[in-house]
Image (cartoon, rainbow, N blue to C red):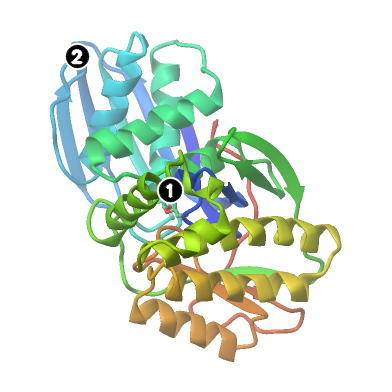
Amino acid sequence: MIRAFGPGRVNLIGEHTDYNGGLALPFAIDRGVTVEAEPLAGGEIRAEARDLGERDAFPAAAPGRAGGWRAFVRGTVAELRATGVPLEGARLAFSGDVPLGSGLSSSAALEAALCLALLAVAGAAEPDRTELAKLCSRVENDWVGAETGLLDQLASLRSREGEAIRIDFSTLAIAPVPLPLGGWRLVTLESGAEHTHAAGGYNERRAECRAACEALGIQHLSAADPDAAAALPTPLDRRARHVLSENARVDAMVAALAAGDLPAAGVLLDASHASLRDDYEASVPAVEDAVAALKRAGAAGARMVGGGFGGSVLALLPPGVALPPAARAVLPGPPAALM
Ligand code: GLA
């Protein structure tokens, strides 16, 4: 029996920057999805989502389309085979502790674990992990219908235990960033509003960013001149302002962490949230309530994580501040791996 674990992720800061050629600072978390796999004669893939009590079966050579979690499994099989992985029949079962729609990237956790498990079933060597992240992102884009960037997949596949990684999406360069938290704690709180990237605001924001780039004649928004961006028609001017200010906050966060200045890290979380709420307009009332509850509980900073429009909130708690009700401490865990 082959077993593979894929972690979810928290993005410390740098939101909606990945598909804009910008900067982000995620880490893999100590929660995720575990896939069990074994070869199956006959060329069929049989999959079971244990937490949902649901099953799927399809020919490996022709997965065909399906919705929900089935799109992730079928897409991963098809994309692996398209790169020449000799994958035939397999029996798969998965379960996890990153709730779907919680904004902690259950989807990247599932994709990463599926890839490693299916590569092992096929007896294929693991390809370069950045290439594997791109493959997972094609599953999201072409099979699930979410135009997500590479943030979640790189975090799940290329993180380092105990550290965050600074990703520069203009080059895909990755640098480790230690997280010297001392007695401070990072916690997540589910807002209760589920989000899905395939619907709603996420794809709309991507379209707005593309429109801004076309108007400015640039490849990606992170390359925008601030004055030219400010002259864009609204709301494109505000979308661009978020991306440029968020990139600056990523490096300010790296500096704050290097200096052990955690109060400054809290201020940056708050500033990121304000920018996502006001300039990027990616918040919803349930997320605002969760941020307010965490701040009332004594957080030094709190912000939405991931694509927004629902999902989880991340907060930084000073030493001695009790864990707010329903919040969970989160630690930087190891990247996806065979177990
Ligand atoms: C989602 C997407 C990522 C990224 C974030 C926002 O998590 O999957 O690619 O765009 O939203 O930073």
Q: In this rendering, is residue 166 above or below 199?
A: above
SS label for mark 1: helix
Residue 87 point in image, percent of width and height:
32, 13
Q: Going 44% across and 76% down the picture, which residue do you hit?
A: 278
Q: Going 57% across and 91% down the picture, which residue do you hit?
A: 296
Q: Going 58% across and 34% down the picture, which residue do you hit?
A: 172
Q: In this rendering, is residue 278 above or below 162?
A: below
Q: Residues within 10 Å of mark 2 (few under 14, many from 20)?
A: some
Of 81 and 267, nearer the camera is 267
Question: Of the residues shown, which amino acid type is indicated by label 1?
Answer: Leu
**As drawn, is 284 to the left or to the right of 11?**
left
Residue occupied by mark 2: 61
Which residue lies most toward the right here?
259
Quadrant for residue 271, please give it.
bottom right
| Residue 325 appears anywhere in the view | no
Residue occupied by mark 1: 216
